[in-house]
Image (tube, grey):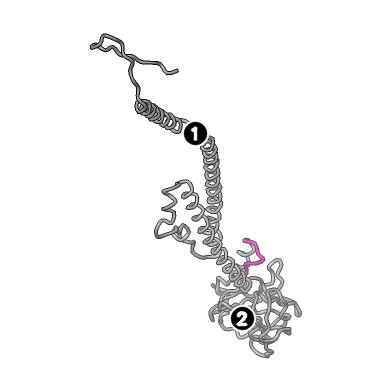
């Protein structure tokens, strides 16, 4: 029940009832509602400022989890980067050294994305995502360069393998104990003409019929029968400006133009041409110059044997007919 209100009228000296109009009631109600609204807004603002809604709590948890995942991804990218750095180091300092080629410049390896920062827009929104993508991109580019480098190394290694297989790196006859060298490379007194002449190869003394082997891969350039000079002889073209000559052969079993592999038998020791006893005269010709074949005997010898054969195959002292130096 609505309470009645009075006021004291000094004119009549009585308490008079206050008359309340409908408008008064309306404005009172309106004021109350406005105040309530302001208070409600205040409470709501306080709540949303200092307390999270369940949805926000869930989103924050998801956010923290995502952040953790991104950090883990970054760690994995960093780990892969370290593995790649090891491969790059091996590439530059081992493989490229062996294959005698220049290392890849660091500027090429670390080639950045270049130009404008493609992650600028993203950086403004999330530094974490932008840096993760940047790292992944950098890794991808470096991996691409590394894979290209491996392609190049494979080609170089194959070419090197081909070249190494062509070098006359073995002795033309079986020479265990290194006792077959009968006449080294260098100036000597000719065994028949008795005048000082250059011996342009190495002589290997061996019984007639001893097999003679191609000393490196190549193509038979010449296989001819001859009664003078080196007698029956074979010349192999190894490529790279290298040729080998095999003289005084009893017979040969190859013909010009034939492809030959290192270690294949090309014929047999004889004493044809100008020769006093069965032996193989063996020459290595490099860029049209006759060189000491012993310098190439690297394939089947250990260091000590190589030193020994080099000494045996090189004439250090020129002996005169009187035996003086
Ligand atoms: Zn000779």
Point out the residue furthest to the right here.
209
The answer to whether residue 28 is magenta is no
- Residue 52 marker: 1
CB atoms of marks 2 and 1 within 8 Å: no
Q: Quadrant of ligand 1?
A: bottom right
Residue 194 visible in the picture = yes
User: Which residue is at a point 66% across and 71% down the rendered structure image?
Assistant: 170
Res. 152 mark? none
Q: Which mark is residue 237?
A: 2
Instruction: Assign the C terminus to one quadrant of the image.
Output: bottom right
Q: In the picture, residue 303 is in which quadrant?
A: bottom right
Circle nearer the N terminus (2, 1): 1
Boundaries of the magenta span = 295-304
Direction from residue 9 to residue 157 in the image, left or right: right
| Residue in view at x 51 percent, y 37 percent | 56
SS under mark 2:
strand
**Residue 25 screen position, x and y as percent:** 37, 25
Assign a secondary structure to mark 1: loop
Percent coordinates x, y for residue 38 in the rendering: 39, 30
Q: Nearer the viewer, residue 103 or 87?
A: 87
Residue 171 picture location, percent across and down: 66, 72
């Amino acid at each position: 029940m609505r309470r009645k209100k009075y006021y004291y009228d000094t004119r009549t000296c009585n308490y008079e009832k206050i008359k309340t109009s409908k408008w008064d009631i309306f404005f009172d109600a309106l004021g109350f509602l406005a105040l309530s609204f302001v208070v409600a807004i205040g409470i709501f603002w306080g709540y949303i400022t200092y307390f999270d809604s369940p949805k926000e709590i869930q989103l924050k948890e998801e956010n923290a989890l995502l952040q953790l995942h991104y950090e883990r991804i970054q760690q994995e990218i960093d780990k892969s980067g370290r593995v790649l750095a090891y491969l790059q180091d091996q590439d530059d300092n081992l493989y490229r050294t062996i294959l005698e080629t220049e290392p890849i410049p660091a500027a090429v390896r670390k080639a950045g994305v270049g130009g404008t920062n493609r992650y600028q827009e993203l950086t403004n929104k999330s530094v974490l995502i932008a840096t993760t993508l940047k790292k992944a991109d950098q890794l991808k580019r470096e991996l691409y360069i590394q894979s290209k480098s491996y392609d190049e190394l494979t080609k170089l290694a194959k070419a090197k393998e081909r070249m190494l297989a062509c070098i006359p790196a073995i002795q033309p006859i079986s020479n265990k104990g290194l006792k077959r060298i009968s006449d080294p490379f260098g100036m000597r007194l000719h065994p028949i003409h008795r005048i000082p002449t250059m011996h342009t190869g190495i002589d290997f003394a061996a019984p007639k019929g001893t097999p003679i082997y191609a000393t490196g891969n190549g193509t038979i350039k010449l296989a001819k029968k001859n009664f003078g000079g080196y007698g029956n002889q074979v010349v192999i073209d190894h490529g790279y400006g290298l040729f080998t000559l095999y003289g005084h052969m009893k017979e040969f079993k190859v013909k010009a133009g034939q492809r030959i592999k290192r270690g294949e038998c090309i014929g047999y020791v004889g004493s044809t041409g100008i020769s006093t006893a069965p032996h193989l005269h063996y020459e290595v010709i490099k860029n049209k110059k006759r060189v000491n074949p012993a310098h190439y005997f690297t394939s089947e010898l250990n260091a000590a044997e190589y030193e020994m054969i080099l000494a045996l195959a090189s004439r250090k002292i020129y002996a005169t007919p009187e035996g003086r130096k």
